[in-house]
């Protein structure tokens, strides 16, 4: 019988899937009765999921999506070679679930389209006052109601960032840092603070033309800034093509 | 996996499984991305182990992975956030001691068990277990806690 301490020591390896089978079985049995260890395992599985981000990104070919749709929609009365993994006996539950998911998918796509349409409208209304470009910055899970704008001059050489609804930081300890992102690389664009109302602004500078970057983000960094992002992301924004 | 067709087949299997087992997802335990990634990796390891061989000609050196790829997609804000997280993960892994990073890579990307890694590296089993445990504990501290 495994005690909690022993299981907790093995949870990282269990999350990685590199235990021997007998050890894995023992831990699996223990987890069914232990919410503490289950919670620990959840945290390690979050880590192992993130390790995959370190790998190279590969886009699946479009035909794969169609193959998936074909596989899921094969009628039960006419099995084909590609239906070898389709299990009989699930049709009633499958079809009712399919109906619900289809409805949810339609709603989600409609909401997504509506959101994109609103966003495009917003950009068209705001992106060229006096020849300048304005790109909106949106809050993340950390601070969903935070907002901002990155204003870039017509020639891309000068810019300014304005942020709102972010909590003031202790300037001795932390600052907000703006990152300009291009091809997965991050360049610091500004360090700034906010006032007691959560509002702040700063000029933005970069070694290259600001319009050559594809996205921006803002993180909380140690006072004085960091060479690379290390803290929580509070704002993100896409720099769509002018 | 070492070959594209196997990777694509696994992708189809995983999404089929998600479709059939969607009611098993527990949002209070993990994000969808975590659940999806865990299932995918487990399936990949199953295939690797059943195959009984590893793609020996294909090695993953985390320190040489190109940083020139931004994830494609319509939502560039989400892409920016993902790119930020990717950078944090790569930075965290690069800060691991070499022996821990090596053991982690063999376990994660090649699907080797403790014992197999111990044989490959000619190290005691206990040493390998400790390295993997410490590696993941450190990553958890840097990325999650």
Image (cartoon, rainbow, N blue to C red):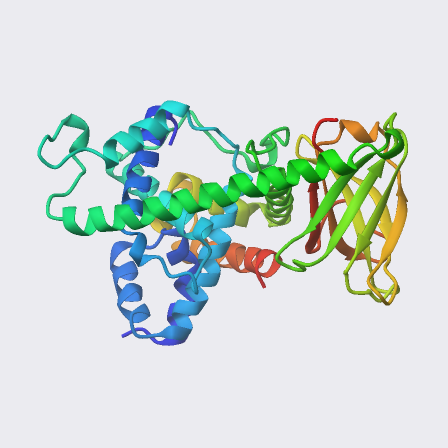
Which of these two is toward me, A236 or A95?
A: A95
- State the residue at coordinates (85%, 28%): A156
A24 lies above or below B18: below
- Left or right relative to B94: residue A98: left
Q: Position of residue A23 (x, y in %)?
A: 29, 61
Residue extending furthest left? A77
Quadrant in which the N terminus of chain A appears? bottom left
Which of these two is toward me, B81 or A96?
A: A96
Residue B41 is drawn in which quadrant? top left
Residue A127 is drawn in which quadrant? top right
- Left or right relative to A3: residue A230: right
Quadrant in which the C terminus of chain A appears? top right
Q: Position of residue A208 (x, y in %)?
A: 84, 28
Quick check: can you spot residue B117? Answer: no
- State the residue at coordinates (30%, 56%): B23
Q: Position of residue A169 (x, y in %)?
A: 82, 64
């Amino acid at each position: 019988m495994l005690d909690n301490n022993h299981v907790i020591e093995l949870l990282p390896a269990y999350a990685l899937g590199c235990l021997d089978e007998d050890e894995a079985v023992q831990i699996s049995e223990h987890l069914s009765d232990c919410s503490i260890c289950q919670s620990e395992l959840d945290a390690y599985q979050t880590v192992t999921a993130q390790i995959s981000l370190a790998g190279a990104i590969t886009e699946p070919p479009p035909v794969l999506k169609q193959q998936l749709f074909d596989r899921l929609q094969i009628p039960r009365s006419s099995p084909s070679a590609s239906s070898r993994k389709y299990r009989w006996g699930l049709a009633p539950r499958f079809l009712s679930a399919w109906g619900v998911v289809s409805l949810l998918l339609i709603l989600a796509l409609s909401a997504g389209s509506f959101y994109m349409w609103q966003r495009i409208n917003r950009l068209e209304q705001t992106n060229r006052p006096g020849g300048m470009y304005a790109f909106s910055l949106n809050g993340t899970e950390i601070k969903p109601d935070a907002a901002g704008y990155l204003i870039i001059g017509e020639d891309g050489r000068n810019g300014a960032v304005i942020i709102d609804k972010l909590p003031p930081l202790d300037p001795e300890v932390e600052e907000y840092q703006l990152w300009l992102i291009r091809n997965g690389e991050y360049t610091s664009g500004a360090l700034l603070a906010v006032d007691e109302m959560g509002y702040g602004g700063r000029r933005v500078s970069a070694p290259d033309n600001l319009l050559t970057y594809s996205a921006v983000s803002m993180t909380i960094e140690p006072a004085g800034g960091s060479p690379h992002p290390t803290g929580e992301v509070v704002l993100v924004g896409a720099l769509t093509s002018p | 996996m070492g070959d594209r067709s196997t990777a694509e087949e696994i992708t189809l299997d995983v999404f089929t499984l998600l479709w059939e087992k969607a009611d098993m997802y527990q949002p209070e335990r993990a994000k969808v991305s975590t659940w999806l990634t865990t299932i995918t990796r487990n399936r990949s390891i199953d295939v690797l182990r059943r195959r009984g061989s590893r793609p020996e000609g294909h090695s993953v050196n985390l320190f040489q992975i190109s940083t020139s790829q931004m994830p494609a997609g319509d939502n560039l804000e989400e892409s920016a956030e993902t790119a930020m997280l990717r950078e944090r993960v790569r930075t965290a892994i690069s800060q691991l001691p070499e022996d821990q990073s090596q053991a982690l890579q063999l376990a994660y990307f090649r699907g080797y068990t403790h014992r197999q890694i111990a044989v490959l590296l000619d190290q005691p089993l206990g040493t390998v277990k400790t390295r993997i445990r410490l590696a993941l504990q450190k990553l958890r501290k840097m990325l999650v806690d």
